[in-house]
Image (cartoon, rainbow, N blue to C red):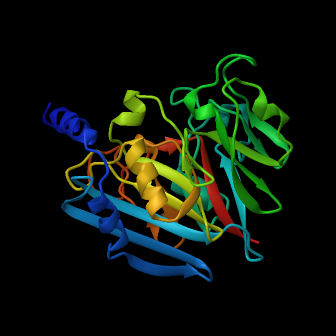
Amino acid sequence: MKHLAFLLLLNLTAVCAQTPADSITIKQAKWTVEEIAKGIQWRKVHFQQKELFHANQSINLLELPVKSRRYRWAVVTADSLAKTDKTKGQLRPTSTLAKEHNALAAINAGFFDVKNGGSVDFIKVQGKVTDTTRINKGQKAAFHGQAAVVVQRHRLRILKGQPTVGWEYALSYPDVMLAGPLLLLNGTPEVLPKTAFNDNRHPRSCVCITNTKKVLLITVDGRSAESYGMNLAELTFLARQLGCRDALNLDGGGSTTLWIENKGVVNYPSDNKKFDHEGERAVSNVLVVKRK
């Protein structure tokens, strides 16, 4: 009951609008910076005393090149290493999927079926469709089915889709993963409807492309006194202050996880209701970067 009351308090405080002071707080933040590999930086910061959006916030991000001769992007699903029908639909933590695919880094990705496994949205890996959108073509697409991350020739892009199911099946890219909602496109914030998902504070995961042709993998921890989490307006504001041109919200909540080789899980997943690195949730798919 005490934990529930605290979560309600976090959501009530989320009505605060972003201010110029929040912009200054982000710009002047004292990030801890570490080079993970050539051209790849891990940055983290913990805003305390309710410094950002009148809240405590713990943010991790990985900065990588959009395209590099050293690295390549990949969408990984929990079924990709399945050997038998019994393992079909099995969910595994982000860290496990990353290690199984020899990743350099990974972030949890699209929305999925917690009970039965599998993505609830379209995913195509190396030209093969592994998951299909679980709404019939022509019907209104879910909020997480109207945008996508695509990879072609090892270059990552964020695309805006259509409000009805079917647009994703026409994409010619070899690697496609739907997610959402879209937060930024060409530097312009998307108009988001007022919903509990959008307006309440939760742990969040996000992928961005900056004006300087970098990719940012961002996690914002939440559901704790140490880090309240963000609503999507706050996440959009953060992405813009970090120089993002395009930004896409990924699955969040207990799924929010950023894993780095030789570092492990670097954020504070919330599924165990503790502010530590042990609360990973098993997921269906992740976005990874690998060495070529």
Task: Name the quarter where the N terminus is drawn.
Answer: top left
**Which x, y percent locates residue 168?**
76, 34
Q: Residue furthest left?
A: 2
Q: How many numbered marks does the figure carry?
A: 0
Q: In this view of the protein, can residue 276 be seen by the observer?
A: no
**Left or right of residue 278: residue 154:** right
Q: Residue at x 42, y 53 (%)?
A: 237
Which quadrant does the C terminus fall into?
bottom right
Residue 72, placed above or below residue 206: below
Describe residue 181's horizontal placement relative to residue 13 as left or right: right
x and y percentages locating residue 82 in the rendered image: 71, 42
Quadrant in the rendering for residue 220: bottom left
Image position, residue 198 (x, y; %): 42, 35
Q: Quadrant of residue 32?
A: bottom left
Residue 163: x %, y % from top left? 66, 26
Q: Is residue 6 left or right of residue 206?
A: left
The quarter of the displayed image where residue 200 is located: top left
Query: Can see residue 34?
Result: yes
Q: Residue at x 78, y 76 (%)?
A: 69
Q: Along the line of sight, which residue is nearer the eye, 74 or 238?
A: 238
| Residue 92 against residue 22 in the figure, above or below | above
Q: Is residue 99 above or below residue 85?
A: below
Q: Identify the residue at image location x=43%, y=79%.
A: 33
For the point 38% across and 48% down, the residue is 234
- In this orientation, which residue lies closer to the viewer: 38 or 113? 38
| Nearer to us in this view, 186 or 94 | 186
